[in-house]
Image (tube, rainbow, N blue to C red):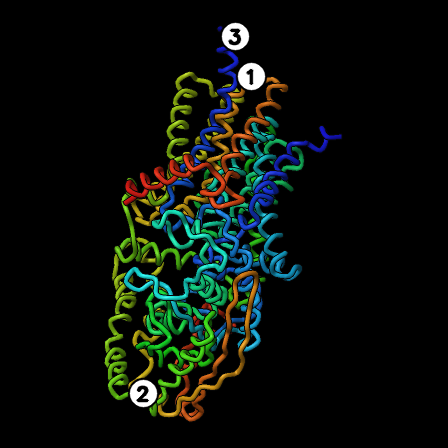
Amino acid sequence: MLSHFKNIKRYLILLPVIFITAMSLINKVSISKDQNVYRWDYKLTYLEDSHHLITEVYDYLKKYDPLFNRLLLMYEGGYRDGTITDEIALHENVIQPKDPALPASSYGEKINYTLIYNAIAGARYFSSLVPVHIRSDLGWQGSLYPYYQGYTFSDIGPDAYSRINYKDTIAILSRVEEKHQQAKETLEKMSISNISSKKLAEIMEKYRNIDDKFEIYSHVFKRIRDSESILSRFTKKYISEILEKVPMKPILTENMIKDMANELKFETIDEQYFSSGSIKFKVTIVKAVMPEYYKKQKRSWDNIECWNFSTTTCLRLSRF
Amino acid sequence: MFSRLDINIFILILIPIFFSLSNVDWIYGNLGMTDHWIAYNFFQDFFHEQVINAGQFPYKFTRVSNHLYGYLVHKIFPPIPAYYFYFFSLFYCVVMCFYITIRKLFNKHVAIITSIMLCCYTHFHGPLSFESMYQNYTSMAYFMVSIMFAVLAAKQQRFKLYLFLSGVFYASSIHQLLYIMYLPSLILIYTAINHINNKNPLLESIKWFLLGAITITLIFSAISYIAQGMTFFLFVQFIQTLFFVEATAMDVTYWKPLWKTLWDAKSTWLIYLSSIIGILAILVILLKKKLDDKYCFTCFTLIVSFELALLIHLIQHAFSRTMAMGYDYIIYPLLPFLFITIAVFYSFLSKNTQQTNGNRLVAYALLISILPLVTGITNPIEQKTSNWIYQQTLEIETFFDEKGN
């Protein structure tokens, strides 16, 4: 009996192993449902195909804008008021989850196209990142219709003019053929001849109020500048530099928006289908044309220097 | 022949192959998280000057050591094979270096068991759903190499070369700035292990470590300058981090008290539990005055280094309000110290294990660790497991969800 007990005791050595395994399992089952694609014991067959597609689309977009300086992504979908609006598509052969309460992206293996588009946006993110306070004006990741705002292709967003001012090449992403046409028609509506005076007035009004968005960040900058904490001593000079050199207001004026809208035209440059496994979608490249506006008005980002710490392009910041 | 090659290495090589055979998707990340795709931008275009749009906050570029490795791999291979190579090279790098470190500190048996545990620990695979292109993964690999060389320097000949390499890899790991916090722990490990082994002169040690760190930083700075014209990339990252810390302190961003983060960052559970056991072990060693014993001194040092690293996280969370314990991905860099501490616990439990029993235990450890993790990989869980197990899983999920909310 005693020797038997000793044997058991010997195998208690495995306690840490059992403990770690238990922790792993607890971690796996305790992750909340909307995050459960994190659990790698579910076969998410679309992941590898998605990876293929994202890398292919990245290379394709580079052909039209090698440095991604002028490219906006236009894609629809995501969440609005907690509800999925569009582009969450079911895999054709997928089995619906037995429990209807289960989320879209786990057991049922639904393909989330919005996530794929978002990843494409992420893959070219850096080049579209602008000063953090100006990002409010430009939009997250340089997307014309950021998913988190829930815009659809049928609507001109309030920041559309300033986004096209920054970036005049638009890549429309959608798996639905008709959506491409709809997106192009919506872009055409930005021209002064197509836009209603009511809509333009609405955009102007929203644009006037955009100062508040800028205030959020300039407020933080100013608070840090004026703060007496130890950390602030280090950041103060840096912050002062930003406040001094980078404008804290929207760069477009109402007249500039009207000038743009006056001659805005869109040309389709290219269309291409991408597919891998069961996932497929189309990319349409559209270019905004407004030659007189360009001649008359340097585009806003052309006027800003020293956005980065590059000592080759920004000699005034040579100490960095 | 096998004894020279160390068969345990083959066991460790096989583990991710088991995972891959069960589900090839396990190495692909969740698409919704864009951070690793942002890194992908640099894997492709590291040397393309992105002047206009580099932004006021070129934060993402400053992870030079991560981007450069990804860039080189993607230059050699096409995208998908490059991703495989990138992922597995880093996975094996962490696991092998961990194994060698523990083997040097304790023995092969402790090393293989704890390496198996590390391989199978879910949070090692990436708290943000395998965001392996995110700098977390590369920085941990560099840091693990740095620890390994520090231990080798303290126990082997040619300590200058090892310390130089340790410095090189440590400086590479701090491109994720969190690793700066672990320098005291790294110094402690080296100093203590060196004190009971080689007794290398400390000034000489510091000199060679710094030489390695400075050399690689200068190289990275030159590469960073050539790539994007940014020489002092670490300074830029430091300044920006301070800015974020400041912004957080002003309640601009999200912050939670420590106890509330338990549900958000469940990887902390293992850390807190290990920390409590560690503190008890420290007290026992001190009260029993066992510090003269070589083995106890090693254990004591390793546990203290973990506690020290954790303490810095806790202080940061409590006083600078940076959520240093609030997100799994911020806690992720603690994994090397955590598992070294677990190796200490295991070495204590298995102190008198015979070789024959040891082999059997390795087999059991493999089974216990891998089987639960591969269950349900090939098919969605409701198809793979019995209905009863599935229902239990759902109940557990619901329980945690309710608790979490």
**Measured from the top left, where is residue B236 in percent x and y?**
44, 60
Asked if A27 appears above or below B217 in the picture, the reply is: above
Q: Mark 3 points at which residue?
A: A3
Asked if A10 appears above or below B36 in the picture, the reply is: above
- Given contact means CB atoms under 8 Å apart, are the residues at marks 2 and 1 in contact? no
Quarter that holds the C terminus of chain B: top left
Quarter that holds the N terminus of chain B: top right
Which residue lies at the image location 49% right of the left edge and 15% below the top edge?
Answer: A9
Describe the element under mark 1 as helix, strand or loop: loop
**Measured from the top left, where is residue B60 in percent x and y?**
46, 61
What's the CA distance linking mark 2 and mark 3? 89 Å
Does the image show residue A49? yes
**Measured from the top left, where is residue B386 in percent x and y?**
46, 36
Tell me the number on the disc at residue B399. none
**Measured from the top left, where is residue B125 in percent x and y?**
50, 44
Tell me the number on the disc at residue A195. 2
Q: Which amino acid does label 3 sit on?
A: Ser
Given residues A204 and B287, the one toward you in this image is A204
Tell me the number on the disc at residue B352. 1
Describe the element under mark 2 as helix, strand or loop: loop
Would residue B263 appear left or right of B302 to someone viewing this image?
A: left
Which residue lies at the image location 33% right of the left edge and 86% below the top edge?
Answer: A257
Q: What residue type is labelled 2?
A: Ile
